[in-house]
Amino acid sequence: MLTVFVICTGNSCRSVIGEALFNHLGQGRIQAFSAGSHPLGRINQGALATLKHHGLPTEGYQSQFWEAFEHQPMDIVITVCDNAAGETCPVYLTKAVRAHWGVSDPGHAEGSEEEKIAAFEQTYRTLELRINAMLALPLETMPPEELTAELNAIGTLTA
């Protein structure tokens, strides 16, 4: 089973949705975790509502610091926000394949309630599309350089 680490600075929206989708769509093949460099300490209610709307679990998520996983080997690290992409990842992640999948932060969406819900849905659909594209790859047999290139290309897909 491959381990995927989804990183976002605050670890309250995008990375949690990514963690949930990886674990749901990649059952038996992927085990995902999420964390942040500056976690907010709480999960955004809009992210939980979006997961619930799609029938995914909403329990057990934590907004946590990435150092909490220093003893957990990671195969793939995916950053989902531009701030996290530009930060220096912890030393324990140096052997992992890394990719950047920038997604707008739905937690900062403004407007009506419907517009805010639409922002979370867009994030969900984009991450779902990218994760499904990733899961279509022969991940277990790809050389790291090829996997990195493919994952970064997948990071440009939008729903």
Image (tube, rainbow, N blue to C red):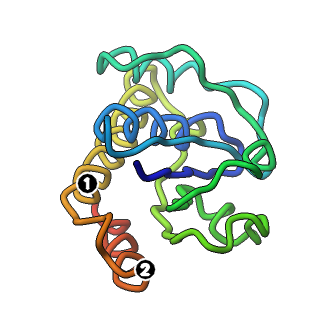
Tell me which residue sits at (36%, 81%) in the image: 143
The answer to which quarter of the image holds residue 83 is bottom right
Earlier in the chain: of badge 1 and badge 2, it is 1
Tell me which residue sits at (34%, 41%) in the image: 122
- Count of numbered circles on the image: 2
Residue 144's mark?
Answer: 2
The answer to which quarter of the image holds residue 61 is top right
Q: Nearer the viewer, residue 83 or 75?
A: 75
Left or right: residue 43 compared with residue 153: right
Under tag 2, what secondary structure?
A: helix
Residue that numbered label 1 is attached to: 135
Left or right: residue 62 compared with residue 133: right
| Image location of residue 133, percent across then percent down | 23, 58
Tell me which residue sits at (32%, 37%) in the image: 28
Asked if the residue under mark 2 is in contact with the one under mark 1, i.e. CB atoms within 8 Å, the reply is no
Tell me which residue sits at (63%, 68%) in the image: 85
The answer to whether residue 42 is above or below residue 74 is above
The answer to which quarter of the image holds residue 42 is top right
Under tag 1, what secondary structure?
A: helix
Dot 2: within a 10 Å radius of its alpha carbon, few (fewer than 14), some, or many (20 or more) residues?
Answer: some
| Image location of residue 5, percent across then percent down | 56, 51
| Image location of residue 75, percent across then percent down | 51, 61
Residue 156's mark?
Answer: none
The answer to whether residue 103 is above or below residue 65 is below
Amino acid under disc 1: Leu
